[in-house]
Image: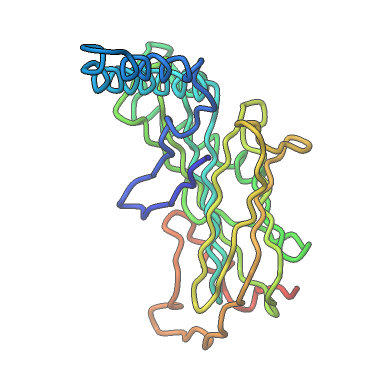
Amino acid sequence: MISRLRSRSRSGGIGFVHCSSLVQRVDNPQRVLRVSQSFHGSPGGWRGFFPAGLLLAGLILGARLSAGAHDVLGTYIQHAVQLTVGARYIDVTLDLTFFEEWSASERKLMDADANGNITRAERADYLRKLAPQVAQQVKLRVAGRELPLVPLYDPEIDLLGSEQVGPAHHRLRLCFFAPTPAGLRAGAEFLIEDRLWPDAKALGTPQAEGRDGCRMTTEIFVETGLTPTRLDDAQRFNFRCVTPPAKVAPQKTSPFGTAGKVSKFSPSSEQSKSPANRTDL
């Protein structure tokens, strides 16, 4: 079973799924178990080898699981999608983990001077060029209507301690928001369409959270193996509103500006978050 990710705070970093839980099979594990059982069933001194046989079987299985997970995930990008629904705003956070093959490809793009090392300036330039592209590749629909997503923060990248070009892992975080539509009802469907890196094999891990009394559920479609549902190059993550958020009092304006959630990198996003810009379902 594919574990679900839990998105953490900005200061807490980005989580990722444990690799060994994704391996589908081990080559002939029954054979290993039969060998250990033969020690137990043999007369005399063979019975004393039973604990050692079990230990050997465990070591072999663990080694194969670890190696198998490494091989399987090397060509994947993990898409951890978190939807947070409150009375005023809907937040969409995507944490992408690039494994060996795709991390090497993106690192090569970051390395502008092709010297094999990725500098802070090169990372910043890579993200600056990437931002407008990824903003067009994530869509949100609520009850069948598309809600325009606004970047809440600039994209963030973590090279996980390796600043060299080549096979490695790295993570990319994308944050968007949209005003919560008025008249949101229980049973309303939320759909996130993700067209990020459509040529890569994708592993999707969705999670939903409600605020202001809202309760959300994640609808997971179980499939065989690691092949995700990719219709017209999009991953689709479905969520459903169980209990809509409670109404909150309008924000008050002070001499120092409007109180509320402020975009760290997008000064104009606060204007977009104004209740006057809310759309009705």
The way the protein has been coloured in the rendering is rainbow
Q: Quadrant of residue 107?
A: top left
Q: With 259 as the anchor, is 131 left or right in this view?
A: right
Q: With 153 as the anchor, is 215 left or right in this view?
A: right
| Foreground of the two, 170 or 23 | 23
- Pinpoint residue 42: horizontal percent, then vertical percent: 32, 13
Residue at x 46% of width, y 84% of height = 253
Q: Looking at the image, can residue 101 be seen? A: yes
- Pinpoint residue 181: horizontal percent, then vertical percent: 67, 73
Residue at x 75% of width, y 73% of height = 281
- Pinpoint residue 129: horizontal percent, then vertical percent: 54, 34
Q: Quadrant of residue 112?
A: top left
Residue extending farthest front: 43
| Foreground of the two, 128 or 8 | 8
Residue at x 43% of width, y 17% of height = 34
- Pinpoint residue 130: horizontal percent, then vertical percent: 55, 36
Q: With 231 as the anchor, is 71 left or right in this view?
A: left
Q: Is residue 176 above or below residue 87?
A: above
Q: With 40 as the anchor, is 214 left or right in this view?
A: right
Q: Looking at the image, can residue 104 be seen? A: no
Q: Is residue 101 above or below residue 146?
A: above
Count the marks: how many? 0
Residue at x 75% of width, y 66% of height = 143
